[in-house]
Amino acid sequence: MSNSKWEDGVRKVVPYVPGEQPKDTNIIKLNTNENPYPPAPEVRDILDSFDESRMRLYPAPDAAVLTEAIAERYGVSPEQVFVGVGSDDVISMAFLTFFNSGKPVFFPDITYSFYDVWADVYRIPYETKPLRDDLTIDPEDYKKPNGGIIFPNPNAPTGILESVDMIEDIVKANPDSVVMIDEAYIDFGGESCLPLTEKYENLLVIQTFSKSRSMAGMRIGFAIGSKKLIKYMNDVKFSINSYTMNTVTQLCGAAAVKNEKYFRESVDRIIATRENTKKILADMGFTFPDSKSNFIFAKPPCKSAEYLFNELKKRKIFVRWWDKPVIRDYMRITIGTDAEMDEFIKAVREVIAE
């Protein structure tokens, strides 16, 4: 079919490709960094008691019940909190709000692969900065004129944690642009740079309920920053769609964030399993950066990462692999339950021995 004239005006982009979501439930799913444990029991209480007649009403556009719970948990005012439908929604809104100077936005060349997609969708110029040989960020690359900066900490898919001091160095060097730190995995062993938001009004810190709070299916993300930053984001959000988060999700999120004991226990279980898995993989000859996330970015000792990825898939064990320069020798392994990781290790031994 020949190209139609109307297609000349279509905004064409290469979309983000998420990890595979198999329909078969009889698998071990270690490819999308989900939490293997259920959310806080209060979430079930909300679902069981929810009055379905409330579904006929629009949800609160300011998501006050959730915003206030997050603000209390992190010791900030509600005016410093922005909530969205997953951290992807939050970051997308932040791109749209803050990256409009015409100067290129900076982010690493090996990082969350949605960043360049948003930049392309919103027609934002960008430059990727290479990681150093040890896969860490070189802060000097981010001390040049720019239209904004974003990177995850810990980084994805490497799992490497950068220090708060290094991040402050970058923020301090960029008073004329907004710096965003994507802390999707910070709860698994990292020090958050949230306290810096009280010192720098151009710093936005983004977190999510999808990983450490086991609520990927409900899509809750949030940002904390200066009141001025959050007001600008809300102004844009309310100009597009005020009712983005449904009532049930708001209530469940608020309930989950209040149970600190369950949250800490769940995270500690994953950290313990991660550290044990690191030791086993190292003994088998795998090499990997020191992960402070809920996954390990590992290079196999003999078989290629692609081969191991495919052989594990045949055994209904799903991990993540990218056919991209630098990282194609690695596969990313989400930390599951102890039982799931035992099955994973068993399968890896079988493949390597073949």
Image (tube, rainbow, N blue to C red):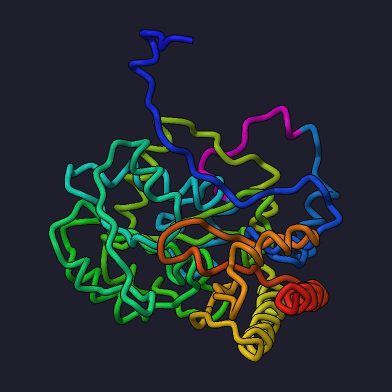
**Position of the C terminus by quadrant:** bottom right
Identify which residue is drawn at 37% across, 36% down.
Answer: 121
Look at the picture and state if 308 lies above or below 346.
above
Identify which residue is drawn at 34% across, 43% down.
Answer: 119
Residue 124 lies in what quarter of the image? Answer: top left
Which of the pair 321/144 is nearer the observer?
321
Q: Position of residue 129 (x, y in %)?
A: 27, 62
Residue 263 lies in what quarter of the image? Answer: bottom right
Provide the major secondary structure of the magenta segment.
loop
Examine the structure image and report whether residue 344 is included in the region drawn in magenta: no
Looking at the rendering, the stretch of residues picked out in magenta corresponds to 54-64
Look at the picture and state if 304 lies above or below 288.
above
Of all residues, the one furthest to the front in this rendering is: 354
Which of the pair 305/320 is nearer the observer?
305
Q: Position of residue 104 (x, y in %)?
A: 21, 49
| 154 relative to 215 in the view: left or right | left
Q: Position of residue 4 (x, y in %)?
A: 41, 9
Which of the pair 79/282 is nearer the observer?
282
| 13 relative to 304 in the view: left or right | left
Examine the structure image and report whether residue 58 is included in the region drawn in magenta: yes
Identify which residue is drawn at 17% across, 42% down.
Answer: 102
Residue 346 can be seen, yes or no: yes
Residue 33 can be seen, yes or no: no
Identify which residue is drawn at 52% across, 57% down.
Answer: 322
Q: Position of residue 22 (x, y in %)?
A: 74, 48
